[in-house]
Amino acid sequence: MFFIRLKIILLSIIILSGFSFFLLYKLDSYVKNQAVSILSSQLSSITDFIFDTTHIVDNAPVHNLALLDTIKNQSNMKDLWISRNDKLSDELGKQKTSLRDVIERKTYVTRIEEHALTKIDNTNNQDARISVPINTNESCLTCHTGLKVGDVAGSVNARFTINDSIMAIYDTMKVELMGIILIASIILMIVMMFSVNSFTKLVYSMKIAIQSAIEGNFSIRIKSQGIGIFSEATKLANKLLEVLDKSITSIDKKIATIFIYKKNLYSKNPLIRITELIAELTNLFLFKNKIETARANKEVYRELQAVISKYIKYRYMIFAEIINNEIVSGYKLEGETEMKISTGDVRGIEKRLENPNPNILFNDEKGCLFISTSIEQLNVIDLKIFISQDIVLYYSIMMNSKKELLEKENSISRIYNYIREARPIIKNIILVKNIEEASYSDPLTKAYNRLYLEKYALSAESKLQKHINFGVLMLDIDHFKKVNDTYGHAVGDAGIVLLTETVKKCIKPTDKLFRYGGEEFVVILEGYDIDETQRIAEKIRNMFAMAKRCSLMELNFQKSVSIGMSAMPDFSRNVWECINQADLALYEAKETGRNKVVKYSLKLKLKDEQKKAKEAQAMQNPTNSNEIDVENDDEAAFLESLKLNR
């Protein structure tokens, strides 16, 4: 009998130990596979971005391999390399690259990503290998004629070490599990000495509790059978389960304070669920780090689009950025095709959001609202995000069926976590932009100031290298001093504001209006030749003469504007020189009757040089200043007189 009991005790210890170590092994494998999956996803995304043929410079795709440094510089990275197809090597005239291992060769055969884990001898660490194929598409053939569509042009390969970062947790868990095993063994032995029946009930109770713990339910307790020392052991085991239950619940609640999630989207086992949530939080942290470096909101909007694409497979998606009820940016995405959106697309989203009985999936009461609609062929999730009082974002996600719609409604909480992180970043970008615009704008007219003109001049001259034309206008309100003296400075300011508002109605959003000083303004028209520039100038002149009301007040007196014009590169490749030329033309307009547009010409330059020559000679020889006279229309005589004066 003793040996039977001893065998049962030993068998119980073996079974419990097996379950415990199997759980540790599965948890270890899961965590390490998750690490491989995360880095694999990063490597695939960066590879797709680097070899995406939509990045064109000088009509040729550019592959920015420096982006791989974000992966290569990670602390656990051992090696990162790129291999080429032999055909591609021959075409490029480079040495053929040898395939280093089975994983890399397998990638060339399967044409999909391959990875493997290998245990490092004498350690608990793992050596991970990932190979990501660079598959050839039709766009690649424009540069690489030696390949065919579907060929593997090469692969991006990485080898890195997965450290056994959870060893401390394992050690703790091993002690606790060994304690449970020891307690269970003692309970079994004592109970079997006194009562096989009581012992069986106790074993069964322990089995339920331990099995529940393995499955993630730590609320089940071992029922004491009052068998001597086993009663105390049962209390200790139950205390251990209680501590684990409280700890897991506490961790779960703390994660819930920083991360909104639905438990049905994750494992029922709380230990595995917490591991999954930590992986999700890691992705969220990487997302936040990425968008924090964004310089424009459109970069953040694209990252949000990528998040939505990750969790929801859609038929097409619409995005719109609305500022002051105007569509500022947006697109309609169907597969790989991006199209422009219309006012009707946005109005359709707004109409569904205004439904008196919407199917609200999520509402954070802070300006983020998800609703879903299923009407006949329409199966859509609409998202409205308030960034500020004036800025609203819309995402509309269309799916193929109502079944898909219902399935993906659970993914909303995941997407919202990214939106919550992105919203303050978008606000900060807008705030920085507003501060920058305030420093570059005139307080009265909201036109750009001289400081911004100095900055813009550099970018305009760089665009000249790309053969982009520019028209330059210099504007001045006629008899402005008389307006101030007669009607007061408030009316004069209103006249200046009226001119800026008139100009803005006549030019494109890409054109620039600068307050040069007082009532003088400079307008730089991008992509205009000299004839188109003159047409815009005449339009401004006529509209200003007819305009009556501005944002400050109504102006009923007769008013006019004189305009001088020049163009780049027709007359100069320097912005400031071109502005001076427009200023000479403006002076000519003032001298010859006002309320007109005058184009810069060589004649005006010669006239100005003649004037300066007269003034210089008058200063040197005041008594003979009246003897020098050069005809404006005779350019040759003027040049000859300059030589004589020298």
Image: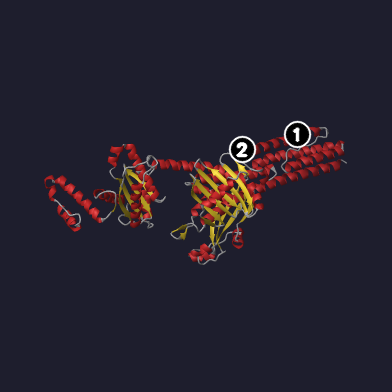
Q: Amino acid at mark 1?
A: Leu
Task: Point out residue 201 in the picture as x, y percentages from the top left corner.
Answer: 83, 39
Which residue bears the numbered disc 2? Answer: 257
Calculate the distance from the C-alpha at mark 2 to the C-alpha at mark 1. Answer: 32 Å
Q: How many C-alpha atoms fall within 10 Å of the one at disc 2: few (<14), some, or many (≥20)?
A: few
Residue under label 1, please give it. Answer: 236
**Which residue of the protein is positioned furthest toward the right in this rendering?**
1
Question: Which residue occupies the foreground of this view, 378 or 88?
Answer: 378
Image side of residue 409 versus residue 137, left or right: right
Secondary structure state at the residue bearing disc 2: helix
Q: Is residue 424 visible?
A: yes
Between disc 2 and disc 1, the foreground one is 2
Q: Which sits in the foreground, 553 or 236? A: 553
Above or below residue 475? Residue 152 is: below
Q: Quarter of the image containing the N terminus?
A: top right
Residue projecting furthest to the left: 623
- Element assignment for label 1: helix
